[in-house]
Structure formats: structure tokens, C-alpha cells
Image (spheres, rainbow, N blue to C red):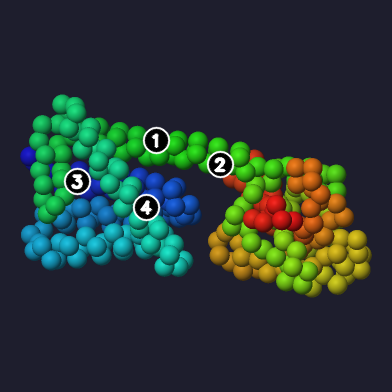
Amino acid sequence: MVIYVDILFFTNFIMDTHLLATTALIAGRRVVPRRLLLGAAAGAFFGCLLFFANLSLPVMILLKLAVPAAILLLAFPFERLSSYGRTALIYLAAHLLFGGGMYAFYAFTDAGSHIRAVNGVYYMDLPLWLLLLLSFGFYGLARGFFYLLNHRKEKSFLHTLTIEEHSLLALLDTGNSLYDPITLLPVILCQWDSVPLPEPLLQAALHKDASALPRLSKEFPHLKLRLLPYTDATGARTLIYAFHPKSLKVDGIERDALVGITLQPLSPDGRFQALLHRDWSKL
């Protein structure tokens, strides 16, 4: 086998990009393109290093433990140890699936004729175009599978939310555990543009103007406005406006809860506009 370092690096770079993208998809991690590409480049460099370097067994084992950990730190921002561990396990599983799929294709077809193991890593002489096609194909299958899975999951968790005669779709979110610290009422999160609200309140919410609360409370006493501490999907802590509607129903059943106004879209494709509290059945 003749191995060209530039082709080896390019192939590994494409495959590592798809591996990290698949990991982000399964783990629900936010993708920052430049970080993901940096992690893929580090993985590709490590693949070339393994092939050409003469490493002792202890050094090779140490590198195989340390480099994937560094790749994940480059590709995804560190949040907490449990999240990092879960991402690492998913990355390992995706790596095994991609590698196993490549080997299965090699073993059951006549596309390649040679295979070589270097430092515990297997290299197959599959054509470059075929390696790239398989890499894109495995990633496409992963995206398609999780799209169908999430679509079915969302459909089963979608409910009709009615706020004072205004109806919208809401997703039951097991991660929404927000309570009002004063009344101890659960809070349903709702996009700012999905419920008709007074213009001054919308402007205050959009501009995060907490100082407007006393004035708005006097102007709209029926809304029973308050400010609640809230941590968004990016981990940023802020204050959001919330109101206590006179009438709130979930699937036609009267419930008692606050409605918090969020600024970011809650659904990437706009299928739902609110997030029910995880204890919605107890509202």
C-alpha cells in the first residue's frame, strides 16, 4: 500500500468532521463551525501521527486517551463534567459505528484489496471518492434517523395550549423546571410573538428593561406581572417577564400557571411556540 499524507489527512479531516457533527446531533450540543473544524483538524493530524510515528505501547495508549478528550474540548465548549462525559461516550459510539460501517463495507465488497494496521489503527485502500461517499452517507443516515426519532417524539409530546382564547402548540419539556419563587406556580415558557400582549410590555421584554415593571404593573394590573430569573439554552442567566393569565388551558383542561415571555425561538422549524412545565399534569 502507498499512503499519501495529504490524502490521509484530508480523508481523516472529512470523516472527523462528520463524526463530530454526528456527536453534536445525538448529544444535542450546539455546533460552532470553527470549533468543530478545529477539532476535526486535530483528529486528522493525530491520525497521520499514528500512522507515521514509531510509538511505544504506553505512549500510544496515553495518546489514544488524551487526544479524543482534547478533540472534544476543541470542538465543544466545556459546560460541566457530566455533560462532557456523555458527549465523550457518544463520540466513542459514533466512532465505532463509522469504523464498523467502513470495515463491513470493505469486508463484504471487492472495492478494496488491502488493509493495513498501524499502531492499532486500520487503514483500507478504498478509493478516496468512495471513502468520502461513505462518510457523507453515514452522516446522512444519522441525521435522517434522528430527524424521524425527534419528529415522532415531538408529535407525542405536543399539546394545545390556550391562553385567554388564544391557542398555540406547546411541547412538554422535561427540562423546564421553572417555578415562580413567590407563588410557587410553575411557569410555561412562551415565545414573545406567539401571544397578543400590550405593546409596552413587549417592548420592555424585548429590551430586557426590568426597570419598567412598576410602571407596567400599574398600567396592566390584570396581568399580575413579575420578573423571574431564567437560564436560557446557551447557559446565560437573565430576567424574563411573566404574567398570570385569567384563563389557561392545556388540551382543553383548565390549569393554573404563569406564562414566561422568552425572546429566542423555541422550535427550530416553528412547529411549537411554547414549552410546558415538566409537571404540567399537576398544574
Query: Crowding near pointer 3: few (<14 within 10 Å), some, many (20+)?
Result: some
The CA span between labels 1 and 4 is 16 Å
Which marked residue is nearer to the observer: mark 1 or mark 3? 1
Q: Which mark is residue 141?
A: 1
Between the C-alphas of marks 2 and 4, the distance is 20 Å
Q: Are marks 2 and 4 in contact (CB under 8 Å)?
A: no
- 3D distance between C-alphas at marks 1 and 2: 18 Å
Circles 2 and 3: CB distance less than 8 Å? no
> Of the residues shown, which amino acid type is indicated by label 4?
Ile
Give whichever of discs 1 and 3 has the lower sequence position.
3
Quarter of the picture holding the N terminus: top left
- Among all residues in the image, which is located at the extreme front? 282
**Residue sitting at 19 percent across and 33 percent down?**
106
In this rendering, the answer to whether 67 lies above or below 214 is: above
Circle on res. 153: 2
Q: Is residue 104 above or below residue 89?
A: above
Which numbered tag is attached to residue 192? none
Quick one: label 1, few (<14), some, or many (20+) residues within 10 Å?
Answer: few
User: Which residue corresponds to mark 3?
Assistant: 8
Residue type indicated by callout 3: Leu
Q: CA distance from mark 4 to mark 3?
A: 24 Å
